[in-house]
Amino acid sequence: MRDQAERLREIISSIKPTREEERTGGSLHGRKTWSRVIAVTSGKGGVGKTNFTVNLGIKFAQMGLRVVIIDADLGLANVDVIMGKMSKYNLSDVIKSHKDILDILEEGPSGVRFISGGSGVQELIKLNKVQLVDLLMKLGKLDDEADVILIDTGAGLSENVLSFVHAAREVILVTTPEPTSITDAYALIKTITYKDKSKNIKIVVNRADNAAEAFNILDKLNVVTEKFLGVKLQKLGYILNDPCVSKAVKMQQPFVVSFNRCEATRNLNDIAITLMDNRELNPASVSGIKMFINRLTSIFN
Ligand SMILES: Nc1ncnc2c1ncn2[C@@H]1O[C@H](COP(=O)(O)OP(=O)(O)OP(=O)(O)O)[C@@H](O)[C@H]1O
Ligand SMILES: [Mg+2]
């Protein structure tokens, strides 16, 4: 039976550019042209989005990908807390200062880079055309610098959260097994798909007691959304309720770093592999950070 490590090696070699691609700097064979932008969200708060985003980012980096995490949670930004490293700058500095985006990204474990949205998220709403073009030029650099850009959004149906979700081509929706969380996840799916039926929504059940419980929820949620909303979700996987997550948060170290053999880390590994599966890398699902910011500002306006 092929083990996880072998699958990982296969995926990494399929992602890495060939000599010819490195030489030309281009993307022959339809390989990487833009970053893959993925928004992580939830209906209910406190379900584990930020831990999921940070640890997934580090897993990707360990797989050899270049990762940037944008903390877009306006009220409760805490990607940096979980990374154990405070960020000096936020998106507002990119908008206002002449600094290069690459200079103000903080570096976390395994080379993952991150930036806090901070007050910059509100400022996006007020950008005029000239400022927008300037911001696109600055952030556009990330398309060359990152294979994956993960965006940690806030929870719920607020306009801000929905804007990020609508602007991203791919969305990962996190829920726990609690009925309140599942109901709120459904409400969010309904709102998202009301606007865009083709949105690629992937579901993760976090804090599951066991695999059977998680798959039961994934199946039921999918049946209901297909029947009432005509939308098929992608069942991305699950993460068990695992004490190592909370221990790691207290240590301010991502659990995939400090507990690399715990259940949650194994579950996250499976999710990272599923996400990086070749079929997922079709050009239709990869549209880059420039496209994302463009959509975001047009939604705001
Ligand atoms: N798989 C898990 N097993 C055990 N505990 C977990 C797990 N995932 C998350 N937690 C606990 O849930 C807490 C909240 O997680 P996190 O801050 O990532 O949620 P969030 O969805 O980002 O919250 P918010 O909506 O406030 O942004 C963590 O501090 C941790 O204690
Ligand atoms: Mg959070």
Image (spheres, helix red, strand yellow):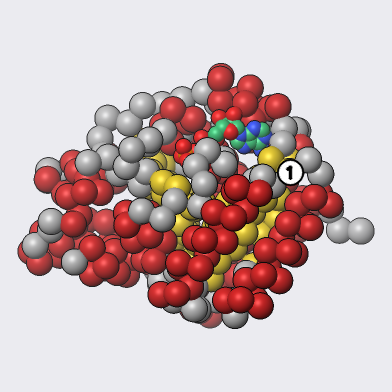
Percent coordinates x, y for residue 89 in the rendering: 25, 35
Residue 157: quadrant of the picture: bottom left
Which quadrant is the N terminus positioned in? Answer: bottom right
Q: Is residue 46 visible?
A: yes
> Residue at coordinates 78% horizontally, 40% vertically from top-left?
209
116 versus 181 height, above or below: above
Q: Is residue 289 left or right of residue 134?
A: right
290 versus 95 height, above or below: below
Q: Quadrant of ligand 1?
A: top right
Q: Is residue 297 visible?
A: no
Q: Is residue 261 left or right of residue 195?
A: right
Residue neighbourhood size for the residue with mark 1, other residues' Cα within 10 Å, grouped as few (<14), some (14–19), many (≥20): many
**Secondary structure of residue under mark 1:** strand
> Residue at coordinates 56% horizontally, 19% vertically from top-left?
251
Percent coordinates x, y for residue 274 in the rendering: 68, 60
Q: Is residue 85 left or right of residue 131?
A: right
In the picture as drawn, the residue positioned furthest to the top comes out as 251
Q: Which residue is mark 1?
A: 208
| Number of disc labels | 1
Q: Is residue 300 left or right of residue 182?
A: left
Which quadrant is the C terminus positioned in? Answer: bottom left
Comparing 208 with 92, the one in front is: 208
Percent coordinates x, y for residue 232 in the rendering: 63, 75
Within 8 Å: ligand 1 and the Cβ of disc 1?
no
248 versus 69 height, above or below: above
> Residue at coordinates 25% horizontally, 49% vertically from top-left?
121
Tag 1: residue type?
Ala
> Residue at coordinates 33% horizontally, 38% vertically from top-left?
75
Percent coordinates x, y for residue 39 in the rendering: 45, 57
